[in-house]
Amino acid sequence: MLGLSFNDLPHYIYSNHRQFHEHEHHIDRIFDEDVLILMRKGMLRFTENDEPIELHANEYYIQRAGLHQNGIEESEKPNYFFIHFKGTFEENGILPLRGTFQSKTIQPILDKLMLLGLESSKIEYECLFYALLTDLAKQQRGETVAEKIRTYLLQNYKAEISLQDISQHCNYSSKNSIVNIFKRTYGKTPYRYLTDYRLERACEYLVSTRNSLSTIAYDVGFSDYTVFYRAFVEKYGISPKDYRAIKQEKFFIPPENERPK
């Protein structure tokens, strides 16, 4: 199935809202830009290289550059958001040419896009465009079990999490299946992934706060300081105390009158 490739990044050009009047037809054209259409209301009708297309609310469609689009039949007062862009298409591309979307996550991105003004940088537009494409792509393939596990771990990393908790969250009866599914995607067990994430957060707190070592350990989800200490040394080859001392010395900026001349 042909789809938009994310290997060669698409580039945003222009976007806006569009509301058809009663009895209005889609324009007859061969356009030199790709167009992403996100339907809100009504029905949009057109042909694309003589193939009939009908789009309804909460459907999206990508009109590719160079194809002949013609509104032979009138549309039913469609209201939609469109984005002109330049993209690359390939078989099994990340984003299919057509699909559905949930406006709950898409609409906030569109709102931010419309708030950008003439003085906004190109990268601000591109950033929101990529966020939109990523969200659309995720909605088409759905959240995998491994992604669902990862999200659960990151959202609850400060709490005690067992395999039983993860199994219940994912509606899986087999704990071994949970471990194997996650490991195939992320190369480590859920427990190892969670521990590594907690240690990464601990490193941030060691550098950015004056909190005690035991407080930091508890703040990132370790219920026992000894377990935290051993895991930290195993991963970084240094104690939390020494890690803090080295990092703080590295990033410490002395007062101006104490700086070397």
Image: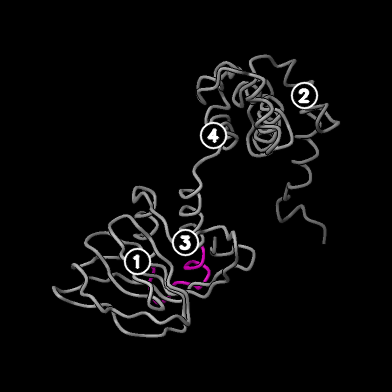
Tell me if 171 is positioned left or right of 30 in this view: right
Q: Which quarter of the picture shows residue 42? A: bottom left
* Residue contact at pointers 3 and 2, CB within 8 angstroms: no
| Residue at image location 68% in from the left, 38% down from the top | 185
* Nearest to N terminus: mark 1 or mark 2: 1
Mark 1 residue crowding within 10 angstroms, few (<14) / some (14–19) / many (20+): few
Residue 209 appears in which quarter of the rendering? top right
Mark identifier at residue 252: none
- Label 2 crowd (10 A; few <14 / some 14-19 / many >=20): some
Where is mark 2, residue-wise?
231
**Sequence-first disc among 1 and 3:** 1
Amino acid on which disc 3 is placed: Leu
Q: Are marks 4 and 1 in contact (CB under 8 Å)?
A: no
Q: Find disc 1 in the rendering and name its residue.
A: 114
Position of residue 204 relative to residue 255, above or below, is above
The residue under the point 56% across, 17% down is 173
Q: Residue 194 at x, y = what percent?
A: 65, 28
Secondary structure under the numbered disc 4 in the rendered image: helix
